[in-house]
Amino acid sequence: MSDAITGADHVADAAARLEQIRAEAPRIHCITNLAANVFTANVLLALGAVPSLTLAREEVADFVSGSRALLVNLGTLDGERRQAIPVAIAAARQAGRPWILDPVFANRSPGRLEMAAALCGQGPAAIRANGAEVAALAQALRLGEGGARELALAARACVAMTGKRDQVCAGERKAEISNGHELMDKVTAMGCALGAVLAAFCAVESDPFAAAVQALTVFAVAGDVAGEQAKGPGSFVPAFLDALYAIDQETLKKRALIA
Amino acid sequence: MSDAITGADHVADAAARLEQIRAEAPRIHCITNLAANVFTANVLLALGAVPSLTLAREEVADFVSGSRALLVNLGTLDGERRQAIPVAIAAARQAGRPWILDPVFANRSPGRLEMAAALCGQGPAAIRANGAEVAALAQALRLGEGGARELALAARACVAMTGKRDQVCAGERKAEISNGHELMDKVTAMGCALGAVLAAFCAVESDPFAAAVQALTVFAVAGDVAGEQAKGPGSFVPAFLDALYAIDQETLKKRALIA
Amino acid sequence: MSDAITGADHVADAAARLEQIRAEAPRIHCITNLAANVFTANVLLALGAVPSLTLAREEVADFVSGSRALLVNLGTLDGERRQAIPVAIAAARQAGRPWILDPVFANRSPGRLEMAAALCGQGPAAIRANGAEVAALAQALRLGEGGARELALAARACVAMTGKRDQVCAGERKAEISNGHELMDKVTAMGCALGAVLAAFCAVESDPFAAAVQALTVFAVAGDVAGEQAKGPGSFVPAFLDALYAIDQETLKKRALIA
C-alpha cells in the first residue's frame, strides 16, 4: 500500500465499522437488477443494514432521502430503471449521501456502457466492477489502456475492482484483498450484492477508500468461511449469509489477506 | 380474546384449514414486490397453494378471476404495479374473492401512504402490516393515535399487525400470537410472504379473523421450528420452507401460543 | 424410441455435451418471469453456462447477439417483456442462434395463449411446456385433441413436455425420461429453469431433439439426487444446485431412465 495504514489497521477498522452497521442499522437504498434484488436485500439484512429497493419514480426520492447510502447497479436496465436512476442520484446528492456505481455487464452493450461512462461524472463515491467492466469503461472514457487506477483518477472515485484478487484504488492509494472462494463466481448477483455492502460501509465510514477495503474484506472473508462449508453453489448461498451474519473481529483477524 | 373461542379451538381450526389448502391447492394471485416474488411463491407452494404473480394489465384480471384470493402488496410500487392493482382488485371483487392488503413501507413514502389509505376503502378482507405501517395508516386516515383496532374498525377489515407479538383485530374481536423467531427479521420479504399465506387461508376460511389467526399461527410456528435448526438467516430460509411443508396438527398443538 | 439411438447413447451424449458446456461457458440470454430470474441464473451458473437477463429494448439485441441461445419464457408478461420478446427473437434469428419457447401458464390467460400460439410460428428450436400448456396450445392452433407430437409437427420444433414422465417429440422421433422427484413441483420456477437448461444444451448441440433429451435427463437426474438429500422444498433448492454442479457421466449412467 502507498500509505502508512497496514492490513491489521484495516481489519480493526472493518470490525469497528461492522459493529457500527449492526448497531445503527443504516437504511441503504438499492436500484439493482432482476437477478440481484432478493440476494442483495438478504445480504444487507445479514450484515445489519436495512434495504429498500423501489424503482418507482414517484417514490424513489423519498426512499433515497431517508437512506444513508445509495447503490446504482446498471443490470437489466429497463425503462423503470432508466427513469429511476437520475432521480435517485439527484436525491442522494441533495441529501449529501454517498452513492455507489456498479456498471455490471457494461462491456456487453454499447448503450449501457455509454450510460455507465456518463454516470462516472456524477460523483459516485465508489465504483464496483470486474476487470472487463473497468476496461470497457476506461476505453469509453478514453483512458487508453487504463485500469482501476486510471478510472479512479478520472472519476475522482474509489474503484473496487473484483476478481481473483480484489483491488481498491483511490487517488494514489491502493490495496489488494486476496480472500474469497471460487464458488462466488457460480452464484448470481454475488458481485452485485458486494456493491450494496460497499454502500453500507460508505454509510458509516466517510472515506470511500477505507470503506471499500473494509467492505471487500468482510465480504471475501465470509466467502472463505462459506466456501469451506458448502458442497456446491447451492449450499454456498445460505452458508454465505450465515457467515456474514456471524462474522467477527477474530475471524477477520485470522483470515483477512490485505496487502 | 373477546369471544368464546379458545387458543385450542384456533389450533384445531388452523390444522383443519391447512389440510384443506393441501387438498384443494387453491390458486392465489399475488401482486407483490421485487424482493418478495420468489419467496412468496415458494412459501405458497410449500403450504400447498398454487401461486401466480403476473402484473401485466392485459392478463391480470384473467389470473385473479381464476384464483380464490388476491394479495396486493405495495412494495416497489412502479408503473406496472400501479396499473395492475385497481384492475386486480376490481376482478377480485367482481368474482367475490377476498383480497388482502399489505401496505409495506407505507411509512417511508407519502405517495405510497396515500395509495395505501385509499385502498383501505376498497374492501380488503384483511390488512397485514407492522406497527410503523399501522401507525402511518392510522394517521393518514385521521384515526388519531389509533392502532390495529381503530384501523380494523375504519377499514371494516381484519388487521393482522405483526411484530414481536402478532396481533389480530376485527371489530371487537382480538387475538395475540406469541410464536416466531428473531431471524424472521433478518430475511427479506418474510412479512410479505405472510400476507400471501393469509390470502391462502382466506381462500378456504370465510371469516377473515379466523383465517388471520390460523395463518399467523402456522407461519410463526414454522418460524419457531426453523429458528431452532438454522445457523443464521441464510440457513433459516430453507429450514422455514421445510418446516411449513411438514407442519401438522401435533406441532401446532405443542407450540402455538395464542391468547 | 422410433430411431436407433438407445438410452445409453443419450447418456453418453449428455455427459459429453455437459462437459462442453462446462468448458465453453456459453452465454445464454433469458427473457423470463419475475419468479424465475434468480433461480434460472443460478441453475445456468451451476451448469457451467453464463446467464444474462435484461429485458430492456435498448440493449436486449446486444445481449442476444452475443449469446449462443435464447430462452423466451412467457411468465409475468408485462409491457417490458412484450416489447423485448420480438426484438430478442429477431436478434436470435439474425445471428442464427436457437431460441426456446416456454409458454408458461398459457392455459390461464387467453391473451397469453394467443401470443404463445403466434410465437410457435416464429421458428423456436424447442418448446418446453407441461401437459395443460401443450393442450391449450394445441387447441389454439386448431390441432384438435393433439398433444406433444402434433404440436411438434405443427411448430416444426422439438417439444419437451414435462410431467410425471417427461416426453420429448420431434418429427417422428420421441423419447421418455422417467427421472425426477415430487419436490420439483413444490419449488417455483423449476420448469422455467429447465427451459434455460434446454437453451444451454441447444447452444452446444445442433439437434434440438438430442439437446432436449440430454437437458431433461441431466435436470431430472439432478432432481433425483437432490430429492434424496432434501428434507422438504426449502432444502431441495440448494441440494439441486449442488447436484447439478457435481453431476457426471457415472451418476447419469447409474440413474438415467430414458426410453
Image: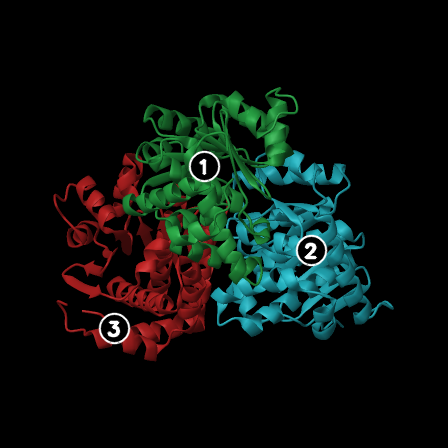
Chain colours: A green, B red, C cyan
User: From the viewer's perspective, is residue A213 above or below residue C125?
Assistant: above
Q: Residues within 10 Å of mark 3 (few under 14, many from 20)?
A: many
Mark 3 in CB contact with mark 1 (< 8 angstroms):
no
Mark 3 or 1: in front is: 1
Name the amino acid, label 1: Ala
Residue at the image point whose x is 29% and y is 67% from the top:
B217
Q: Whole-percent x and y of residue C218? A: 69, 64
Q: Is residue A206 visible?
A: yes
The dot on residue B10 is 3
Which residue is the extreme one toward the right? C4
Q: CA distance from mark 1 to mark 2?
A: 40 Å
Chain of the residue on which disc 2 is drawn: C
Chain of the residue on which disc 3 is drawn: B
Residue at the image point whose x is 18% and y is 49% from the top:
B154
Name the amino acid, label 3: His
Q: Is residue B7 left or right of residue C157?
A: left
User: From the viewer's perspective, is residue B22 above or below residue B116?
Assistant: below
Label 2: element kind: helix
- Residue marked by disc 1: A212
Chain of the residue on which disc 1 is drawn: A
Q: Whole-percent x and y of residue B220? A: 31, 65
Mark 1 in CB contact with mark 2 (< 8 angstroms):
no
Q: CA distance from mark 3 to mark 2?
A: 47 Å
Q: Residues within 10 Å of mark 1 (few under 14, many from 20)?
A: many
